[in-house]
Image: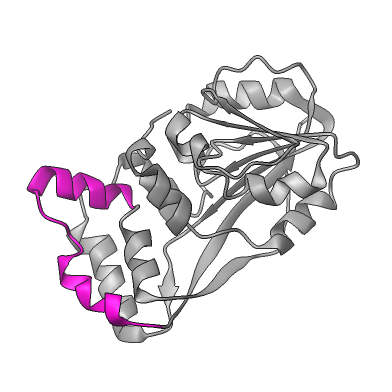
Amino acid sequence: MKDLFSGQSQLYQQARPTYPQTLIEALLTYIPTVEHAWDCGAGSGQLTQLLAPHFQQVIATDLSQNQLDQAPHFSNVQYLQQAAEHTDFPDQYFDLITVAQAIHWFDFEKFYTEVKRTLKPTGLFAVIGYGLLYIEDEHLNQRIQQLYTETLKGYWDAERHYIDEHYQTIPFPFQEIEMPQFQMSLVWTGQQLWDYLNTWSAVKHYQNQLNISPLEGLRDILNKQQIVLSFPVLLRVGRLII
């Protein structure tokens, strides 16, 4: 598993979008018991905080301690610095295992071995993420598309293609459950959009290699007070094949 975000932990926590509550509610309809949940690759807790009210205990793991240090505190949540592929959790322990916007960094085979070992026979496994944002302002949307596909071409990590393919091409050796489609609809200021773009790993790679930010041509967005945008939610949900 790669750790690309430790150096931007605070910005990541502040700038990354939060998943819709309706998504959590949909997952819960498939879970008969709500004792233990594991949020793997939890980062700064974007998804963990939504799981906490519904489970007796949530264990959130991430390779980056810096990321976990930014996560919100809950009495029933335990944060552990731990690789996704090697855990010491008991067998058949979790009612729900989630991995949000992170599975493309994992060693699939080793991680899935842990999922299959630690998930209850009645449990649910959910791969969650979000794709490239869409902005209602057509001109601004075109500029962001150009940034993503042209300016940053060659600076994205190879694993990014799984996001572009909406997680439909990842290995998924589970009994898949068909789920409704979700999206995150938001109204941001220009500063919020600017901060979010600065969390992109390709932006960091570009800046490190060329000593200039690829966002310089977008500085005028900082003056915008209202930007209507949305993210498509990526979702693969399944059970153990028994």
Q: Is residue 34 magenta?
A: no
Identify the residue at image location x=35%, y=75%.
190
Q: Position of residue 121 (x, y in %)?
A: 84, 29
Main SS of the magenta part reads helix
Asked whether residue 124 appears in the rendered view, the answer is yes
* Among the 4 quarters of the image, the one containing residue 57: top right
| 190 shown above or below 161 | below
Asked whether residue 165 appears in the rendered view, the answer is no
| 222 shown above or below 204 | below
Q: Position of residue 20 (x, y in %)?
A: 65, 63
Q: How many marks?
A: 0
Quadrant where the N terminus is found in the figure: top left
Q: Position of residue 234 (x, y in %)?
A: 56, 56
| 153 shown above or below 127 | below
Identify the residue at image location x=38%, y=83%.
225
Q: Position of residue 183 (x, y in %)?
A: 59, 67
Relative horizontal placement of residue 210, taking residue 128 as reference (left or right) = left
Magenta region: which residues? 200-225
